[in-house]
Amino acid sequence: MPISANGGINFLLGNHPEMEEMLGIRPGIGWERLVYLPRMDKGITKPSGCDRYYYRLTFEMMRKYKWATLRNFARKFLWVWHGPEILRNEDEYYLTRVSWLYRLLLWRVGSFGFPYGIIAPLGLIGMLIYLRRWRELYLLYAYVATQVLMMLAFFPCSRYRAPIVPALLIFGTAAAFEMIALARRRQVRDLLPLLSMLLACGVMSTLSPPKFQADRVQNEAENHRLLATAYYEEGSTEVGIATCEKGLKLAPKNPDLHKWLMDAYYEKGDYAETEKHALACIRLVPTYRVPYETLVEIYEAEGRSKEAAEIREAIRSRAAGNL
């Protein structure tokens, strides 16, 4: 297929009437529930069938909520040029804490982000200046336009914006040299309109910042979970557990952290801690099926048949048809 099987689910995220809330879903329990929606709703299990399901659902919503759809497209267009990096399931700015080179090359102050907050406005000005040469440069223009349309169709984030950066650098560098040459020749009348447009593009890059990126504490807790996963994959399970516990102190009501610790302690054979985090996960997300099933397994392993039977009944009554 021309687009991978996750095209439909990304199309739903970027065109849902509640786009900000949908884009706030991170890999974890919320993502699992979204992935299993076709199975729960229509019994669809094939990747291609799931893909079509999400597209059909999204087009129905777009037809029903036309104004919300137009508003979403306008916001996504602004996000294409938004100065600070737009995280998806990783925080680029986290790297600035562990590398002095990243601290020099990647930083933000309020709504201004370096370097994209400079690259994008200059690139736009360069594209405007050299429209007169579009016959020579049509491939570059077509490339940028194609990438922008792709992001409008789905949604912009840092890694989806990255492919247009080389083209913007070409246009932006040309614009900078053009303005420097005008300044040297003291052609103020020609320079002022370009500087005005540059200022306008710079302001545009600060408008309508994304709200789906969570607050600092939530991002920090998520960073701890990602670090814990990396430690676990390296075989350092104990370090991973300690890291995830630190994240839980920051965000005690984060069900994904409880789920991570539940799985880690289950693998270790520590059923007391497994039970604690499974119950916490159930309190936070009562319809999530996985912790119920984990409780059944540990209760049966410990010979607690009555409690295992109660959890099975809970699965049938409270979580039937859900994850």
Image (cartoon, rainbow, N blue to C red):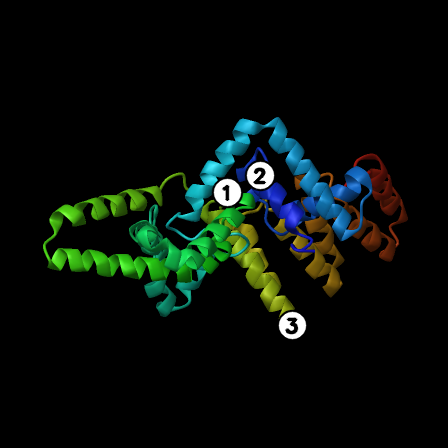
Q: For this rendering, which residue is in front, 85 or 25?
A: 85
Name the residue at 73% across, 65% down.
268
Which numbered tag is attached to residue 15? 2
Q: For this rendering, which residue is in front, 211 or 70?
A: 70
- Can you say which quadrant of the picture contains the N terminus? bottom right
Which residue in the structure is indicated by mark 1? 212
User: Measured from the top left, where is residue 116 in percent x and y?
Assistant: 37, 55
Viewer-side label of 2, 3: 2
* Image position of 311 with respect to 62: above or below: below
Disc with the residue nearer the chain's start (1 vs 3): 1
Left or right placement of residue 63 versus residue 39 in this view: left
* Image position of 239 with respect to 197: above or below: below
User: Measured from the top left, where is residue 8 in percent x and y?
Assistant: 66, 46
User: Measured from the top left, where is residue 230 in percent x and y?
Assistant: 59, 66
Q: Report whether residue 60 is seen.
A: yes
Cα–Cα gap, marks 1 and 3: 33 Å
